[in-house]
Image (tube, helix red, strand yellow):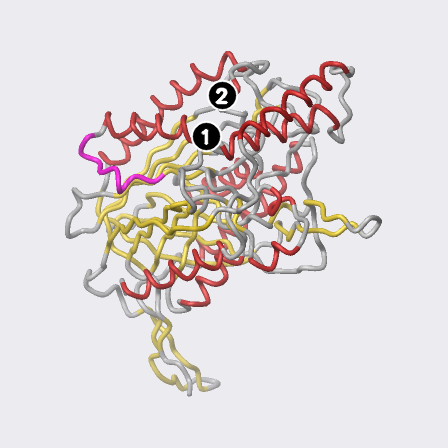
Amino acid sequence: MSLTRVKTRQACLHFGIAQRDATPPVGIFHRFWGAANHDVATGVHRPVRVTVTAFAGNANPSSCSVLVTSDHCLLRPTDMTRMRQAVLDAHPTVSNSRVTFSFGHSHSAGHICSERANQPGGELIASYLDTLQALTIDAVGEATGNMTPARASFAQTDCDMAAHRDFQDLSDDQFVCGFNPENDWDFPVHVVRIRSIDGQELGSLVTYPCHPTTLAWENTLISPDYIGAMRETIESGTAAPCQFLLAPCGDIGPRHGFVGDVSVADSNGTRVGHAALSAWHSLDHVEGDFVYQGPVLSGATLGEWCFQGWPPDTTPFSHDRFHVPLAYRTDLRDIATIESELQDWEQQSQDANASKPDRAGTARAMAERCRREWERVAPLPPGDTYPLQVDILRCGDADIVLVEGEPYHQLQRDLQDAFPDRAIIVGVLSDGSRCSYLPTEHSYKKPLYQVQVSLLAAGCLERLRNAIIERLSTSA
């Protein structure tokens, strides 16, 4: 049977957006790589940005949801709690349950963690966090204050800049975190185009599943990685601000990555940006559903299709926050053991020629691994399960799903497969990554980096997926 109508996914809502340049100062603690020889940032490649969007249903525009995104890798729990509370204190009319933070996850935007104050350049972290807080508060005020009636339309395309990154080195059978050419997936670029009711461009929301790890241990510059050039490409083509939301990519990274050449990051970002622009332009003349009008007699018998026009606004809008209890691994090490090992590696690093560390890591890299293990384990809530937070923003024909941590890409694929008639947009690192990676259950059978640093038991991704599907089904 021939289809005679193609549905346009859209939503009517109130929308506001604001951006701030939040680039950390040169000289701040920068090293996010155990293999790095440097500690502090020596310059700036591209600005680091904070973007805030505010959404509300037309039926109740005063009750808005706020999405704060930053190019930073993440904020650790203590700093994240302070940031959230500062925003709520400054904007008491904004509900705590409707404010969500998400991170672009650039590993080159600076290691912004107050617990790293004792590191070289760490003396700049506290004052920078205060600045970041003030900029975020200001942007939230602007975004919520300039909300206007708008229409969002949704499109999707693919981009092969990213690739699967669980690669088996056959020389010794170990798994390394790097380009895996044997798993050739298509990776979606989701684009939300937001226009005022009279057709003015207000902004866009773009998602892509790829770790911002183009730049690695050889790079000493503050950078948003590929996100910067991607955003510049989109904004130059749309004349409107763009908010980036990192999609599930626990096992996904750039095909060409782990380099020090910033031009590679720019190239990667330009590729994603042009793919997003292609999807954005597919919405240029869209007005409602695309409907078959019938045959037209000409030199050939032609089939005429036209946009039907926008329907009356009946857009449902809701913000649902809930928690999914996920079991901890039973083999997590205790804090005392981690601290003892850290002291041993730090001593070995000091005894070695610390000014010329081996890029493969040795004592310096192993000490960094222990610090990160401490930072993952120390703030975990007590008990046998972790309460993983999920936010679902239901916007007309789309659902924006925001989850904690770093789930594998399979989460995105499974959710979209479960709801083929809706646009399912998934963002990760909601409020950071306190729960770490969520690999697929099958991946726990392999000696993978993401499994080694995971905090939750095998099956966590699948249980999270099932809980989200159940919630989306009951709220339909």
Q: Which residue is mark 1?
A: 76
> Residue at horizontal 56%, vertical 58%?
441
- Labels 1 and 2 touching (C-beta < 8 A): yes
Q: Quadrant of residue 296?
A: bottom left
Of residue 160 and residue 94, the one placed in the foreground of this image is: 94
Q: Is residue 315 above or below residue 447?
A: below
Q: CA distance from mark 1 to mark 2?
A: 9 Å
Against 9, residue 300 (above or below) is below
Query: Which of the two residues, 297 or 58, is positioned nearer the viewer here?
Result: 58
Image position of 101 with respect to 344: above or below: below
Q: Is residue 99 magenta?
A: yes
The local crowd at label 2, few if under 14, some if 14 to 19, many if 20 or more residues have their Cα within 10 Å, is some
Q: Is residue 107 magenta?
A: no
The amino acid beneath tag 1 is: Arg
Residue 115's label in the rendered image is 2
Q: Residue at x 44, y 86 (%)?
A: 301
Task: Write down the region rendered in magenta.
Answer: 92-100
Residue at 33 percent of width and 52 percent of height: 392
Q: Residues within 10 Å of mark 1 (few under 14, many from 20)?
A: some
Q: Amino acid at mark 2?
A: Glu
Query: Where is residue 149 shown, x and y percent of the image?
Result: 22, 47
x, y percent for residue 348: 73, 19
> Taking 278 as reference, is 385 left or right?
left
